[in-house]
Image: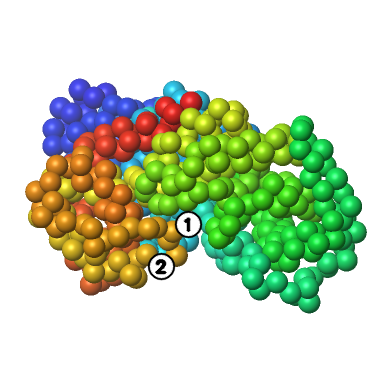
Amino acid sequence: MNQFFSSRYPEFRFISTSLRKCGDDYYFAAERKGNFYLVIGEKSFRFIEEKDAPSVLKKTFPFLNPVSAGSKNSFGFGDRTGLATPGHIRAVKGSGFFPVFAQQSARELERTGRSFSDVINDVILWSFIDGWSEGFGADADHAKTIDVIQKAISAGYTYFTIDPSDKIKKLENFSVQNIRNLELYLKNYSGKNLNIEDSSFVFNDDNTTVLSFLYGDALDFIEECYRFISERMTDFDFEVSVDETGIPTSPLAHIFIVMELQRRKINFNSIALRFPGRFEKGIDYIGDINVFSKELEVHNRIRNYLGPYKISLHSGSDKFSVYSPFKKIVGEMFHIKTSGTSWIQAMKTIAAIDREFFVECIDEFIRQFEKNSVSYEISADISRINMNEIKTGNIDELFSDRNLRQLIHISYGTVLGCDTKNKLRNNFYDIIRKNLDMYVQFVEEHLKKHIKLLS
């Protein structure tokens, strides 16, 4: 087919990894001047533009529709550019991880001007082009409203990460009067004693009251989300995220949350806890690995006692010092979330190809730092970024600088946003599309480092 097609359309590049047959027709992808087309036929051919191809592909090849991950070890690959999936495919291939290729939060969608459907469609197209047929998930990450969940359901998402952080109260605001159903919580938990291996966890009136105050409203919201989804879908992954808090999740809080989820008959697949130390965006773990490991061991024993369910590690990008102890302690049934690190590789590609444009982007990132850093946990000191090094420095050394990495990580909306005043977007996509092989290679190599340490 390659030879026959190429002889008739020499201006197109035939992509052999995409070739499939359905009925009497062949389906494959072809590229011309950075634009991709779905081509259908055997002796005569029909060309379908990139934007229209996913709707045809998902009807023709059911395996290109997202599915649930279930209990498999899974890895979330956030792609803010819509072009990183080939790198994600090549990084995860043969690893045994179930990939969640379509993963974006409402915050990311707002800043990039994309929709849940856009994200899935990009993954469908690239999965077809790169010959991936082993399934993938689609995660509506950090969903905070029913409206967001409804949009994700309509787009075909199969994984829902519920973020009730706005409902989790702060201890300094403690008030017994603000606890709904306190008597029920006290009846169900006060006096309960759990012996888990060599540890004893005891609920009394005081700690039950505090836990009810901290997490009661959040649990109500989680239940509301679960009921909403389960009334509309039967096969989906449901993750509870309590990591977006100011203090680590205590073992007793872990037990309380899980037992409440079970009491309310919420069939959750995974839980993201807040661990000791700092899991900042785009850089390695900050903290004492021994303290982290000891705390994780306790949480894992609780999981084994109350489970089965997965332990999910959020802000998982670039936490290289954590992966080996995490894998050793947790073993199986875990989920890792990454997102911004693939976007950083896009900017690394820009730096390699067009340093002048890269400098222009960094200048704008610094100017918009205050706005972009809102709602992100980072400690970057942008005053330490040396613009002379940005202009002439070694790329690998530049992209090992934690301040620059975090600046880039949070600034994606400045480049990718669809604002009509955004002059950076078109130039960015023009460079990345023309140098897609380099970008994909950077993504593959970087994500493979993550997966290797977790395997």
Q: Is residue 39 left or right of residue 155?
A: left
Mark 2: secondary structure: loop
Figure disc tally: 2
Q: Where is residue 270 shown, x and y percent of the image?
A: 63, 43
For the N terminus, the image quarter is top left
Residue 338 can be seen, yes or no: no
Q: In front: mark 1 or mark 2?
A: 2
Q: Where is residue 121 shown, x and y percent of the image?
A: 41, 48
Identified at 88% across, 66% down, the residue is: 183
Please identify the quarter of the rendering in which residue 220 is found: bottom right
Identified at 85% across, 61% down, the residue is: 205
Find disc 2 in the rendering and name its residue.
374
Q: Is residue 318 left or right of residue 302?
A: left
Q: Where is residue 123 shown, x and y percent of the image?
A: 41, 43
Identified at 53% across, 34% down, the residue is: 326
How packed mark 1 is, by other alpha carbons closer than 10 Å (few <14, some 14-19, many 20 or more), is many
Question: Label for residue 41?
Answer: none
Question: Label for residue 105?
Answer: 1
In contact (CB < 8 Å): disc 1 and disc 2:
no
What's the CA distance linking mark 1 and mark 2? 15 Å
Callout 1, which amino acid? Ser
- Tell me how the rendering is colored: rainbow
Q: Where is residue 186 shown, x and y percent of the image?
A: 87, 61
Q: Is residue 272 left or right of residue 400?
A: right
Identified at 56% across, 47% down, the residue is: 275
